[in-house]
Image (cartoon, rainbow, N blue to C red):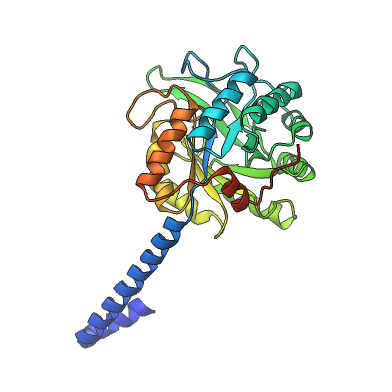
Amino acid sequence: MLFLDVSITIRNGNRDLVSWFLTLAAKRSNKTIEQQNKNMSHKKLILSAALTGAATNRSHCPHIPYTPVELGEEAKRAVDAGASIVHIHAREDDGMPSWRTEVFEQITEEVRKRCPDVIINFSTGAIGLSAEERIKHLPATKPDMAAFNMGSMNYAIFSKKQKQFYWNGVFENSFDTMIKVVSSMNENGICPEMECFDTGHIHNVEPLREMGLIPDNACYSLVMGVLGGIPASTENLIHQIKQVPEGAFWQVIAISRKQWQLAAVACTMGGNFRVGLEDNFYLPNGEMAKSNGECAEWGVKLARMMGREVATIAETREMLNLPLRNS
């Protein structure tokens, strides 16, 4: 209506009123932006580190950790550099993905030896396994958080140079599967980290929330750059952010070298971001990272360059309502 009123006013020749309207609109816009920037600058950023992943190996990056001891050491490096959450996939000692509960238990032990208060976030995502197989480690280990994948999708790695798929499959996450996964998390006091690979995944949260399955502190992870999901771009990230309910915690997980660009966008939008060798081997200067500690160190540098301070583990636990469990 305001724009209609202005067009009528212009046709009537009342340019003083037009000038007044535009000045008022500019003042309101500037005030809103200033308030948003003020709020953003006082809100500390939560930095996560994804230590290893499951789709890559040391032929891609020689510094990827495999064993529980290596993962414990990498967690310590990331925490010392500023990360407060470590996201972990289990592997066998030869680097193959593992879903053995005892491996997750060993990882928990090695991480807790070195980082007693860090927020541990275990994976539940796998192709070709049942929901029961994907979550059987949760009751035994009771991590603070666990990845909760919010929808089915094609999931692939494609080489433009070779013009072929390295691998591809269907990542099954039906609503029945999601209900089983999040119910196990709720039963074990685990915060769901809701991994959303496309816009529809964000909205898949809503029926589960209506069913009372989504706790208030559940987190949105906006995953970008996986083939089969939403491409990694600034425009797409802004679109995804607009879908997240107001006041909810969100972070961007950008795959490969666009990670740093979208991390900067997340900083300016009042969000959070993830680094680590699961997502991207390369630092902003183009060098291959030698550890997850280097990735986290650059993440802290970027956040501070963008006017954000990074939350400590204690601050992150308070912000996400994740009290430290009794050992």
Compared across the picture, whether 308 is left or right of 151 comes to left
Residue drawn at point x = 65 percent, y = 54 percent: 206
- The image quadrant that residue 92 belongs to is top right
**Residue drawn 49% across and 25% down?**
157
Quarter location, residue 258: top left
Eyeballing the image, is 5 above or below 247? Answer: below
Residue 223 percent coordinates (x, y):
52, 40
Task: Name the residue located 71 percent from the left edge and 42 percent from the top edge.
Answer: 178
Q: Quadrant of the C terminus?
A: top right
- Marks counted in the figure total 0
* Residue 314 can be seen, yes or no: yes
Above or below, 8 against 96 in this view is below
Q: Residue at x 33, y 76 (%)?
A: 3
Quadrant of the frame with the N terminus: bottom left
Q: Position of residue 53 (x, y in %)?
A: 56, 26
Find residue 316 and report its horizontal and vertical position in percent: 58, 47
Residue 127 lies left or right of residue 188; in this view the side is left
Q: Horizontally, is 309 left or right of 197 in the view?
A: left
Q: Nearer the viewer, residue 13 or 283?
A: 283
The reply to whether residue 259 is visible in this rendering is no
Asked whether 94 or 114 is in front, the reply is: 114
Q: Residue 71: where, in percent of width, then height?
A: 59, 23
